[in-house]
Image (cartoon, helix red, strand yellow):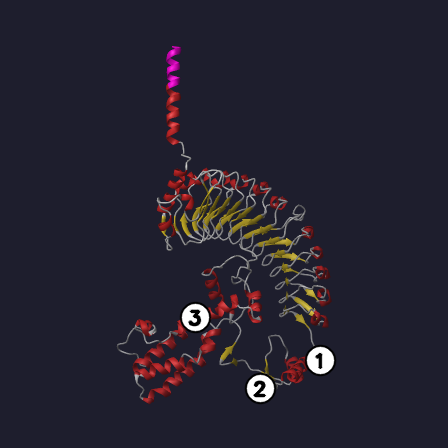
């Protein structure tokens, strides 16, 4: 009996060893080659033909582009295929690169789900999959990579909640999940990430309160949670355990309550961004202890009471943004005189009162001061000072201001006696309801057809005068190109015209070219889009008014994004967020209504060229 049992045990042992050898993952350089060739087979688009021409059996894989082998072990240690415009999916065999330390697939067109086999890459320290189109939930297997220090999945299409398993990554220093479609709450287990320096989960759909455990990670340098749906209040002791923190980015959420006075203990803080929330109460005077603070964003909250004079202690401050609140009282600009770096102050749409002090003129570094939509008071004496400024300008420029041609336009709420007194003090005539500048109407609010109907009527009148000249078709085309379309360029560069008017103008031009009259439709004509093609493509070289309007607005939007002139910087600071996207909530502007769509379109279709990195201050 004992011999039989021994025989059975020996058989089971041998069988188990045979089965184990069948499933054992090979660990040779040939295995790495098989894994990489499997990845190559799953690449559906390689526009630069980098892998197609370089990843071949005729050369060692250690010489392949993007592949780095370890000097100690003849195995693949790093795979860097960033910025190659590759398209495809990640195959499971990639998990056989058992010596892989770094995986960088940044800025490609990879898609689909990530295979669970990546959990076999136990030596991985660096993973960057940003700027791709990976989908599905973030795999829990990332939490099984014990040596992982850097995980960047931003700008993909991941959905679902943030896996709690990420809290197992004891060595993790940087976690970036920005610009996905993640939902749910931030796991409170993240408090266990005691090596974490950067936590960035911006532009998602996260909800709930920020776990208090996050503020106990003493190694944190940056907390970036902008653009979510987070709610609740900030812990009163939020900065008690954050000695290294330099940036707090919590704008565009639904946070409420008071700004903790404890924020002063984040002594190294350089950026405090709390805009577009529902914070209430006074700006804490303790903020004045943040001597390293450079940017203070408090815009669009429910902050009230007076502006604390301790703001003047922020000697490193470059930009102060507290517009769209309910802050009241007068502004003591003498508090800002010691700020040698201050360049921008935004305090518009508050409840400030009183007069502006002379000290505002002594802030010599200031480039932008925006104080509109407050309750400041003035007198006829102040109005006369404006006239003296104009006279001084005349004396130093040699130009003369024509008072007869000058007009002054008043905002709502200005009483008739006030209007009369200001007009008399300045010597300007009060303007009417309709205002034109360089042929373009000036108005408030969204552009309507009624704003541009006069321009359309003038164009139709020109067509009518030309109808009796017996022009040839070539002559009519020349007039449309050189006169009609060029006469409204300025207006189309400024405003987004209503589609109904653009279609009407296109129709009038088409009818005039084919029949000589604007009100007679041609019985047989070439398609208008074909006529608007360039001559080399068989068209007439005409331009569609719809395309013209969009292209001119795109040109203006690009200048807004990239221009360095003062108007460009002013518009950027008021209408764009720090990532270059159009702000969600800004004051109504007839020009901005048309520009914001083109701005977002250009930003989404553009990318930064890093080059040698010499001029790059911060890459996100």
Residue that badge 2 annotates: 405
Q: Which quadrant of the view contains residue 508?
A: bottom left
Mark 1 burial class by Cα count in 10 Å: few <14, some 14-19, many 20+:
few
- Residue at 53% across, 62% down: 583
* 400 lies above or below 209: below
> Which is more foreground, mark 3 or mark 2?
3
Q: Going from the N terminus, do you reach mark 3 or mark 1 first?
A: 1
Q: Residue 551's mark?
A: 3
Q: Position of residue 34 (x, y in %)?
A: 37, 40
* 594 lies above or below 149: below
Q: CA distance from mark 1 to mark 2?
A: 23 Å
Q: Position of residue 46 (x, y in %)?
A: 37, 53
Q: Nearer the viewer, residue 350 or 17?
A: 17
Residue that badge 1 annotates: 381
Q: Going from the N terminus, do you reach mark 3 or mark 2 first?
A: 2
* 130 lies above or below 117: below
Mark 2 burial class by Cα count in 10 Å: few <14, some 14-19, many 20+:
few
Residues in magenta? 1-10
Let me know if residue 517 appears in the view. Answer: no
Let me know if residue 379 appears in the view. Answer: yes
């Amino acid at each position: 009996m004992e011999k039989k049992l021994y025989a059975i045990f020996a058989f089971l042992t041998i069988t188990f060893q045979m089965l184990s050898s069948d499933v054992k993952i090979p660990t040779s350089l040939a295995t790495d080659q098989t894994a990489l060739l499997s990845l190559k087979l799953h690449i559906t688009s390689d526009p630069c033909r980098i892998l197609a021409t370089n990843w071949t059996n005729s050369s060692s894989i250690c010489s392949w582009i993007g592949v780095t082998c370890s000097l100690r072990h003849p195995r693949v240690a790093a795979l860097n295929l960033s910025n190659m415009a590759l398209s495809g999916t990640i195959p499971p065999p990639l998990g056989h690169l058992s010596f892989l330390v770094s995986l960088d697939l940044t800025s490609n067109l990879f898609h689909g789900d990530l295979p669970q086999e990546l959990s076999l890459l136990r030596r991985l320290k660096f993973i960057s999959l940003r700027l791709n189109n990976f989908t599905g939930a973030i795999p829990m297997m990332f939490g099984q990579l014990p040596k992982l220090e850097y995980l960047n999945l931003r700008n993909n299409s991941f959905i679902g909640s943030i896996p709690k398993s990420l809290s197992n990554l004891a060595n993790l220093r940087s976690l970036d999940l920005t610009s996905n479609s993640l939902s749910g709450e931030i796991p409170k287990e993240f408090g266990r990430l005691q090596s974490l320096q950067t936590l960035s989960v911006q532009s998602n759909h996260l909800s709930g309160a920020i776990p208090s455990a996050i503020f106990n990670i003493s190694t944190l340098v940056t907390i970036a949670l902008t653009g979510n749906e987070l709610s609740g209040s900030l812990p009163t002791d939020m900065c008690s355990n954050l000695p290294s923190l330099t940036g707090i980015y919590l704008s565009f959420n639904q946070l409420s309550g008071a700004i903790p006075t404890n924020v002063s203990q984040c002594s190294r803080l350089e950026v405090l961004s709390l805009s577009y929330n529902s914070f209430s109460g006074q700006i804490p005077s303790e903020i004045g202890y943040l001597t390293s603070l450079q940017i203070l964003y408090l815009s669009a909250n429910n902050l009230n009471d007076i502006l604390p004079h301790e703001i003047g202690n922020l000697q490193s401050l470059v930009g102060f943004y507290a517009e769209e609140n309910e802050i009241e009282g007068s502004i003591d600009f003498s508090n800002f005189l010691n700020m040698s770096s201050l360049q921008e102050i935004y305090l518009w749409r508050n409840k400030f009162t009183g007069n502006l002090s002379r000290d505002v003129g002594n802030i010599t570094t200031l480039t932008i001061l925006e104080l509109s939509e407050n309750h400041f008071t003035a007198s006829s004496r102040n109005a006369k000072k404006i006239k003296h400024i104009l006279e001084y300008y005349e004396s130093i420029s040699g130009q003369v201001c024509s008072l007869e041609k000058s007009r002054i336009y008043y905002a709502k709420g200005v009483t008739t006696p006030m209007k009369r007194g200001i007009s008399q003090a300045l010597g300007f005539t009060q303007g009417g309801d309709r205002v034109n500048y360089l042929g373009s109407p000036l108005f408030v609010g969204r552009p309507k057809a009624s704003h541009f109907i006069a321009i359309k009527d003038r164009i139709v009148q020109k067509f009518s005068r030309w109808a009796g000249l017996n022009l040839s078709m070539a002559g009519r085309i020349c007039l449309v190109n050189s006169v009609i379309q060029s006469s409204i360029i300025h207006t189309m560069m400024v405003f987004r015209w209503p589609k109904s008017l653009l279609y009407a103008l296109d129709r009038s031009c088409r009818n005039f070219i084919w029949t000589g009259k604007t009100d007679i439709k041609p019985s047989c004509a070439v398609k208008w889009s074909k006529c608007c093609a360039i001559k080399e493509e068989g068209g007439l070289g005409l331009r569609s008014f719809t395309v013209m309007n969009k292209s001119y607005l795109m040109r203006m939007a690009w200048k807004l994004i990239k221009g360095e002139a003062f108007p460009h910087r002013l518009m950027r600071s008021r209408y764009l967020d720090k990532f270059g996207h159009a702000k969600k909530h800004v004051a109504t502007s007839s020009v901005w209504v048309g520009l914001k769509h083109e701005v977002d379109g250009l930003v989404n279709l553009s990318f930064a060229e890093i080059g040698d990195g010499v001029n790059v201050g911060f890459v996100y």
